[in-house]
Image (cartoon, helix red, strand yellow):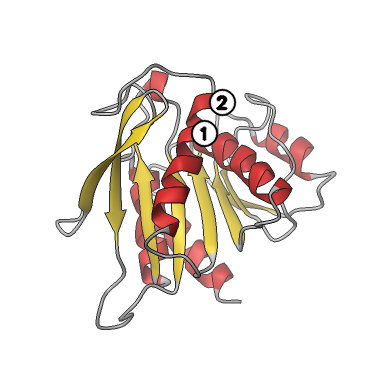
């Protein structure tokens, strides 16, 4: 965790939610140019907001000048409640967004997630579309296609997946992305957790965001 990480808690529907905020370099970005919400992998299989992929996404958005915020899902760390199969987690992420909008009301919004977190963010994106408040862009790493009923996502979504992912097979992601006509960026030799491949995630997100 970054020594400058700001930790805080929010009152959620199932109790307190443990959250963390990382801001971009103040000299380069006197004020954040955007807001990024980042969601972690499955809480019943060790997923937390301090997951290495989640932290890598946090650093990528800091490099882009975004305020990057994440939270522990229900039952993880200091967050209260129990796992709710993505329904309660999506509602909690919406509460976090509502809170962050009081601090950053007018900047663009990005949603990012890893594994189970991609399902939560895709569901939140659907809610925001229905409310006519679309996000700027999504970044989905290790998309949970085939594991969860992933809803459609916008055409400009950045999809990153490991070639040797045996948790969520690459073929399942292709089957989900194909009718959406969204390219999938494949990291050669990478497993689900991107061991020794994390640098590619940050580099890809930053490079593609600035195109």
**Quadrant of the rendering where the C terminus is positioned:** bottom right
The residue positioned 63% from the left and 38% from the top of the image is 123
Instruction: Name the element at disc 1.
Output: helix
Instruction: Residue 17 in the image: state x and y as whole percent.
Output: 32, 34
The residue positioned 28% from the left and 48% from the top of the image is 20
The residue positioned 36% from the left and 19% from the top of the image is 81
Asked if marks 2 and 1 touch (Cβ < 8 Å), the reply is yes
Q: Residue furthest left?
A: 3
Res 59 seen here: yes
Taking depth in this image into account, of 33 and 130 the one nearest to the observer is 130
Q: Is residue 197 above or below residue 17?
A: below
Q: Quadrant of residue 208?
A: bottom right
Badge 2 density bin: few <14, some 14–19, many ≥20, Cα 10 Å: few
Residue denoted by label 2: 87
Residue denoted by label 1: 91
User: Residue 36 bears which disc, if any?
Assistant: none
């Amino acid at each position: 965790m970054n020594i400058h990480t700001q930790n805080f808690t929010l009152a959620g529907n199932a109790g307190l939610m443990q959250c963390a905020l990382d801001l971009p370099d103040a000299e380069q970005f006197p004020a954040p140019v955007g807001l990024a919400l980042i969601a972690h992998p499955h809480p019943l299989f060790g997923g937390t907001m301090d997951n290495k992929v989640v932290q890598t996404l946090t650093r990528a958005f800091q490099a882009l000048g975004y305020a990057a915020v994440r939270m522990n899902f229900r039952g993880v760390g200091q967050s209260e409640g129990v796992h709710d199969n993505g329904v309660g987690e999506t509602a909690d992420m919406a509460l976090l967004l509502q809170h962050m909008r009081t601090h950053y009301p007018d900047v663009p919004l990005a949603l990012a997630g890893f594994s189970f977190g991609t399902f939560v963010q895709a569901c939140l994106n659907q809610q925001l579309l229905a409310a006519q408040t679309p996000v700027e862009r999504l970044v989905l790493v290790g998309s949970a296609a085939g594991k969860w009923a992933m809803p459609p996502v916008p055409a400009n979504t950045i999809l990153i997946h490991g070639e040797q992912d045996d948790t969520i097979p690459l073929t399942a992601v292709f089957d989900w992305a194909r009718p959406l006509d969204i390219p999938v960026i494949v990291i050669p030799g990478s497993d689900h957790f991107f061991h020794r491949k994390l640098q590619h995630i940050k580099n890809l997100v930053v490079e593609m965001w600035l195109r």
